[in-house]
């Protein structure tokens, strides 16, 4: 006997849970179906080694929209985001560049590398912050359709034009340049020191299959700057207990509104009858009925895997096929017997708390990308390494540590073939070797190491090609182009009751929860219900 | 020597095709104009040089494909000695196996091309042409200002908006995506044939510091094919009889007939400025020419950094000038040949085509990689023309000249070009010999122009033939940089009209025409607020 719900959300990632929470809050009977035995999607904390919690996919928290945290009262569900500072880029000559939180120390550190760069930094920071302020209000809004003549779309477009017009000609010009240029060119305009440029450029490439010299990467930088922790824009924090805490808090909120989460329930097929969704069929043969189906899966999985081509318009199918979703990053999660030391950096330095990078020039970063283009992992990879247990001791036994290593670039396939376990080992070794050449005792401290290729991420988390943003963050796939032009408003016009809410929709990936909330707002609007979902951004 | 005492309304710096087109328009409107050309012959990048005894070649631009028809008619170029030696030249992309692909407009032949690809190419072309058509409206006038204040411009923008709207929803959506995406992905979506994908990719990256995987490269393709909308001799590429220098000569003749003075070997030292207002130019030999209006068809860096000088500019303008990206990445190769070249597997009748060496997209991307690090390509891409097949005047009887645009050759070569030039030249000949085995036996003389040579010979900063990279952050209202995008500059009376301004490089002549229009409309209008007033 099939169960009947008002709405079925496919996938218990953070966006699916956010979406479900808002729908349940509005009084709908909602079920969230999760393929794995645990919830969270890419925001999980898992014990893969006894007594260690691995935050083994996404690892830091900043983009999660504060209005959602407040609105769904996530702190009361156990979410606690702890800010952290610091960060180092180690150099081949034995020196390093440290990212001090304190303004004066930061200036002195920059001046140590280049006096000019120290002076340019405040200009750089102000310019990036200006761009951040422009984009933030659009995160919690549904993008307008520029091809439409509906009053709502025209109103939104005019609003957008006003916001941009308000910047003045200089501001608008700078914004247009910023959105279309490469992070490398952008940084070259401010800085001369290689290590400073390399330190800042990382945010322009993380998660994308583009190099530091590819046009459009300056915008990706923004994507890593527009978050905040407790109102401090651009800072980053760690969710206490790992990123799983975010998912658990969202699930807690959802359940408090009467929602149901059903794990180990893989959806095989979304059932469409007469152009309307009527429910889903699970791989175990069960059917669950509901007139609204929301997919938290990426656009490719949604339209090419769990929906039938015959139910969809032809252009949508071809757009889904052509959607760019490239795996470009891998991950190592390591259990450590103690805290590793790093060459030239005192153990008690506050810089140690932040991310560590081991690549000190833009050409080295670009070469890492060249390896990816030719179908293999980077031999000299860009690594974003963090030891969260320094800030949040709950993730490992006392005195022990957990290390999260994000690695760029790793292709979804090696020369067009699948990853083998030898490839995975060799990939892990490349990364460990790079770190240990700056940390003499690192290798001896390793108790357990989980190596995840993009293919592993795809198999476990369900992100196509292991792309962490569910689709490249390039302008042909952003705003009203996300996921595809004409389908950016979370619904599938040809199939009544069918919605998307994953990171493949506006405003994109990162643990932001905005796509889930925006999709909920659209669904409630279609149901003629009062919208409870916050809109825009009041704080800016 | 020109009598410099006679008063001029306008001084045009640079006798390239844009400078001359601008001068012609101004003279027609009754202005007294003088053109100052630093070199000994007019034409700028439209030049023909004899690089070996009795062998001549178009030494910079080699194909004509974007010259606006109105330039030809307005300047009566045909009466002044301008003539094409061949038009609608097909493109043949050479295959390593000898099974080449030829593109005749939207028709394909050879290389075992499938019916599916043929159909797909037709519809791809059709859509691209639609987009080009819309874009061409924006090319023929000054670019819109970022925040529109003039009623005429608002109307023009609305017109453009209507044009885009009339494309219909589906095409409009494609345009929103294709304008920003890279050519590599689009090729993978549309076609199977490697040569076809590579041929289209070459057109997208030619003359720029980008590879097929770089975002925004579809725009590069549209840009190149604008000529198919308004170019003389369209569709496709043409050759000018006597080489491109003949175009320069005929333009010079035409402006002289309109009463314009041209002074050759006149090297400008600086533009004289009195409190943000132009008063004339000072030549290197110390002479001063007074004029209320100075038009510089030099590139923006040379104009602002050399002629105007930082002391006369605001800090922000100086910074913006510095940040204009214009480092050339293309070299020019000229070879004098003892006979007709024979390419492996290529019918003799096809030797006169535009020949491309770039067998697949990965090859192009790999050619691009080293240039990012200041090294030249190990397997470069080439755009080859053998103009003497169509124009016997360029070489002695039975002999031929081969001219090729070669990518990628970075301006800032690691170790310098002095050391790098010979190895690169040898590598290029080796690369050619894979397709044309007898090349070494037939070669009489070789000339390689690196971006550094192009800079010195044609006086373009960085040796960049577009006077600045054609990428989305440097086109339309952002060309050459915001605030100077409507041909006017922060210095009253100083105008820019070179390829560094909208709509950019390629032998189009539109930048020159648009500048003239702008100058002529100035008197009638109230002075518009300055760029920086709006902040």
Image (cartoon, coloured by chain):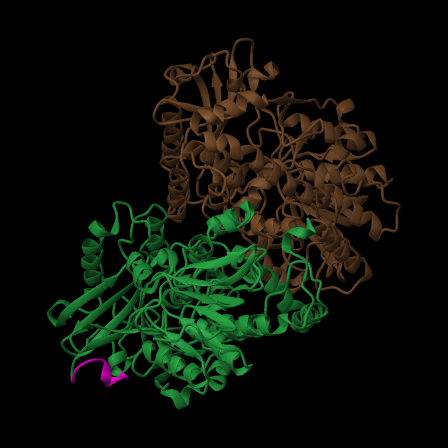
Query: What secondary structure is the stretch in magenta mostly built from?
Result: loop
Q: Is residue A83 above or below residue B110?
A: above
- Report the residue at 36% width, 16% height from top: A440
Residue A152 position in % (x across, y down): 81, 57
Decide if residue A120 is in sight here: yes
From the viewer's side, name the closer residue of B123 and B39: B39
Give the quadrant of residue A463: top right
Residue with the most extreme bottom position: B79
**B396 in the magenta segment:** yes
Q: What stretch is highlighted in magenta?
A: B390-397
Residue drawn at point x = 57 percent, y = 26 percent: A55
* Left-right relation of A220 to B217: right
* Residue A362 sits inside the magenta stretch: no
- Chain appearing in brown on the rendered image: A
Q: How many marks?
A: 0
Locate residue A218, reporting x and y percent.
54, 44
Q: Quadrant of residue B142?
A: bottom right
Letter of the chain in green: B
């Amino acid at each position: 006997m099939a169960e009947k719900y008002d709405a079925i959300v496919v996938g218990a990632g953070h966006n699916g849970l956010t979406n479900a929470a808002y729908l349940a809050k509005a009084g709908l009977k909602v079920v969230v179906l999760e393929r794995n035995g645990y919830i969270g999607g890419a925001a999980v904390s898992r014990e893969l080694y006894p007594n260690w919690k691995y935050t083994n996919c996404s690892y830091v928290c900043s983009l999660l929209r504060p209005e959602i945290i407040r609105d769904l009262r996530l702190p009361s569900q156990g979410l606690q985001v702890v800010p952290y500072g610091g960060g180092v880029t180690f150099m081949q000559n034995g020196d390093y560049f440290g990212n001090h939180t304190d303004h004066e120390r930061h200036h002195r550190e920059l001046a140590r590398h280049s006096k000019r760069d120290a002076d340019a930094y405040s200009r750089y920071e102000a310019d990036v912050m200006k761009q951040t302020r422009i984009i933030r209000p659009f995160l919690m809004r549904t993008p307008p359709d520029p091809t439409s003549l509906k009053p709502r779309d025209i109103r939104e477009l005019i609003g957008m034009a006003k916001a941009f017009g308000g910047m003045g000609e200089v501001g608008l010009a700078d914004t247009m340049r910023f959105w279309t240029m490469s992070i490398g060119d952008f940084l070259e305009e401010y800085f001369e020191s290689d290590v400073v440029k390399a330190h800042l450029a990382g945010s322009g490439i993380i998660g994308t299959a583009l190099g530091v010299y590819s046009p459009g990467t300056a915008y990706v930088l923004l994507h890593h700057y527009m978050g905040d922790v407790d109102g401090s824009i651009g800072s980053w924090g760690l969710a206490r207990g790992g990123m799983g805490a975010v998912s658990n808090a969202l699930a807690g909120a959802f359940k408090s509104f009467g929602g149901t989460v059903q794990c180990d329930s893989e959806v095989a097929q979304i059932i469409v009858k007469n152009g309307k969704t009527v429910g889903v069929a699970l791989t175990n043969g069960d059917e669950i009925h509901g007139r609204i189906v929301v997919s938290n899966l990426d656009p490719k999985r949604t339209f090419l895997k769990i929906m039938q081509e015959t139910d969809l318009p032809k252009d949508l199918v071809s757009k889904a096929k052509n959607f760019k979703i490239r795996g470009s990053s891998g991950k190592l999660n390591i259990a450590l017997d103690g805290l590793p030391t790093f060459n030239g950096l005192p153990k008690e330095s506050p810089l140690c708390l932040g991310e560590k990078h081991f690549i000190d020039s833009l050409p080295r970063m670009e070469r890492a990308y060249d390896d990816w283009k030719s179908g293999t992992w980077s031999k000299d990879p860009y690594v974003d390494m963090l030891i969260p247990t320094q800030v949040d001791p709950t993730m490992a036994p006392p005195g022990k540590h957990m290390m999260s290593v994000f690695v760029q670039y790793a292709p979804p396939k090696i020369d067009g073939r699948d990853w083998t376990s030898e490839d995975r080992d060799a990939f892990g070794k490349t990364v460990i070797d790079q770190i240990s050449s700056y940390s003499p005792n690192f290798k001896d401290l390793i108790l357990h190491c989980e190596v995840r290729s993009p293919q592993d991420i795809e198999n476990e988390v369900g992100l196509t090609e292991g792309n962490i943003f569910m689709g490249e963050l390039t302008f042909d796939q952003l705003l009203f182009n996300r996921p595809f032009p004409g389908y950016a408003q979370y619904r599938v016009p040809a199939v009544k009751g069918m919605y998307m809410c994953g990171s493949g929709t506006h405003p994109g990936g990162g643990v932001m929860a905005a796509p889930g909330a925006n999709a909920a707002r659209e669904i409630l609007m279609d149901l003629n219900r009062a919208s409870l979902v916050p809109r825009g951004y009041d704080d800016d | 020597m020109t009598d410099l005492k006679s008063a001029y309304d306008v001084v045009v710096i640079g006798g390239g095709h844009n400078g001359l087109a601008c001068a012609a328009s101004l003279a027609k409107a009754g202005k007294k104009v003088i053109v100052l050309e630093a070199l000994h012959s007019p034409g700028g990048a439209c030049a023909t040089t004899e690089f070996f005894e009795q062998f001549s070649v178009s030494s910079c631009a080699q194909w004509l494909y974007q010259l606006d028809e109105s330039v030809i008619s307005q300047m009566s170029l045909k009466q002044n000695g301008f003539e094409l030696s061949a038009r609608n030249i097909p493109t043949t992309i050479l295959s390593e196996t000898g099974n080449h692909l030829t593109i005749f407009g939207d028709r394909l032949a050879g290389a075992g091309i499938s019916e599916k690809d043929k159909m797909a190419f037709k519809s791809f072309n059709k859509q691209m042409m639609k987009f080009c058509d819309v874009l061409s409206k924006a090319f023929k006038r000054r670019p819109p200002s970022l925040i529109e204040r003039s009623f005429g411009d608002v109307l023009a923008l609305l017109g453009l908006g209507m044009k885009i709207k009339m494309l219909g929803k589906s095409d409009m959506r494609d345009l929103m995506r294709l304008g920003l995406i890279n050519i590599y992905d689009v090729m993978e979506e549309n076609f199977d044939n490697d040569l076809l994908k590579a041929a289209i990719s070459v057109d997208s990256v030619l003359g720029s510091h980008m590879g097929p995987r770089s975002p925004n490269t579809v725009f590069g393709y549209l840009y190149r094919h604008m000529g198919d909308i308004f170019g003389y001799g369209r569709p496709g590429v043409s050759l000018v009889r006597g080489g491109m220098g003949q175009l320069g000569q005929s333009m010079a003749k035409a402006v002289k007939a309109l009463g314009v003075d041209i002074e050759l070997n006149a090297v400008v030292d600086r533009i004289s400025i009195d409190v943000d207002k132009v008063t004339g130019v000072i030549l290197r030999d110390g002479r001063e020419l007074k004029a209320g209006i100075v038009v510089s068809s030099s590139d923006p860096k040379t104009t602002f950094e050399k002629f105007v000088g930082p002391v006369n500019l605001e800090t922000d303008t100086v910074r913006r000038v510095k940040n204009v990206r214009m480092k050339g990445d293309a070299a020019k190769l000229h070879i004098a040949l003892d006979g007709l070249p024979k390419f492996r597997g290529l019918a003799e009748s096809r030797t006169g085509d535009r020949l491309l060496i770039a067998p697949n997209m990965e090859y192009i991307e790999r050619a691009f990689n080293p240039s990012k690090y200041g090294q030249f390509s190990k397997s470069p891409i080439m755009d080859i023309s053998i103009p003497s097949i169509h124009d016997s005047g360029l070489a002695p009887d039975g002999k031929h000249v081969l001219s090729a645009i070669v990518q990628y050759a970075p301006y800032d070569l690691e170790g310098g070009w002095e050391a790098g030039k010979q190895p690169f030249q040898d590598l290029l000949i080796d690369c050619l010999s894979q397709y044309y085995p007898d090349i070494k036996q037939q070669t009489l003389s070789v000339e390689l122009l690196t971006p550094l040579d192009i800079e010195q010979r044609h006086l373009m900063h960085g040796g960049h033939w577009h006077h600045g990279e054609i990428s989305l952050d440097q086109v339309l209202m952002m060309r050459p940089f915001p605030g100077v995008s409507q041909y006017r500059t922060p210095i009253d009376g100083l105008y820019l009209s070179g390829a560094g301004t909208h709509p950019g490089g390629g032998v189009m002549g539109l930048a020159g025409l648009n500048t003239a229009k702008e100058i002529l409309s100035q008197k009638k209008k109230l002075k518009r607020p300055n760029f920086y007033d709006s902040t």
